Amino acid sequence: MVRLALYQPDIPQNMGTLLRFGACLNVPVDVIGPTGFDMSDRSLKRAAMDYITRSDLTRHISFDRFLDSDQRKSGRLILSTTKATTIYTDFEFLQGDIILLGRESSGVPEHVVQASDAQIKIPMARDVRSLNIAVAGAMIIGEALRQTGYFDDRTGSEASVSDKTA
């Protein structure tokens, strides 16, 4: 199983969106504190909607605690950063990989980069800084799930799609 980790998120709406995304695709989400907002924030609840109770959320008080956790020990830590040289679609994802997204305002400090097993990026047009973190997370997790066979068995998702459009 692929996991998503958020390093000290700043914006509750982005975290809420990623929690909802994780709930919909059975992707566990690790939140590494401290966050830039109160975890009971209305914006977080509004973005995650009722999916917040369905998400597999693990909170870590600090990056050091995350590093010592069973979740971290389950696979490679893959950092998404604009400074990477490897494009995410060229990277070979494995079951158990943890995709780490940095803080919206400042990314991650050097010790977090050093703790990662690999760094990947999303290629973008020149003269732009970055994508919205929720969009970037969805792109990378989607590719990781595709590569690790998550979409090979579509029985549950096809049934729910056809039920909604019938």
Image (cartoon, helix red, strand yellow):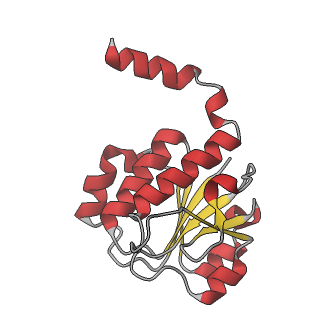
- Residue 27 seen by the camera: no
Q: Is residue 43 above or below residue 115?
A: above
Place residue 4 in its image quadrant: bottom right
Q: Name the one closer to the observer, 161 or 12.
A: 161
Image quarter (top left, top right, bottom left or bottom right) of the C terminus: top left
Q: Is residue 88 above or below residue 142?
A: below
- Residue 13 seen by the camera: yes
Q: Name the one closer to the observer, 151 or 49.
A: 151
**Percent of width and height locating residue 25:** 52, 40
User: Which residue appears farthest toward the bottom when viewing the image?
Assistant: 110
Q: Is residue 78 above or below residue 157?
A: below
Residue shown at 34% from the left, 52% from the top: 48
**Percent of width and height locating residue 31:** 51, 67
Q: Is residue 5 left or right of residue 50?
A: right
Q: Name the one closer to the observer, 5 or 145.
A: 145
Q: Name the one closer to the observer, 48 or 130.
A: 130
**Percent of width and height locating residue 87:** 63, 61
**Percent of width and height locating residue 156:** 54, 23
Residue shown at 55% from the left, 42% from the top: 26
Q: Is residue 126 left or right of residue 96?
A: left
Q: Is residue 26 left or right of residue 149?
A: left
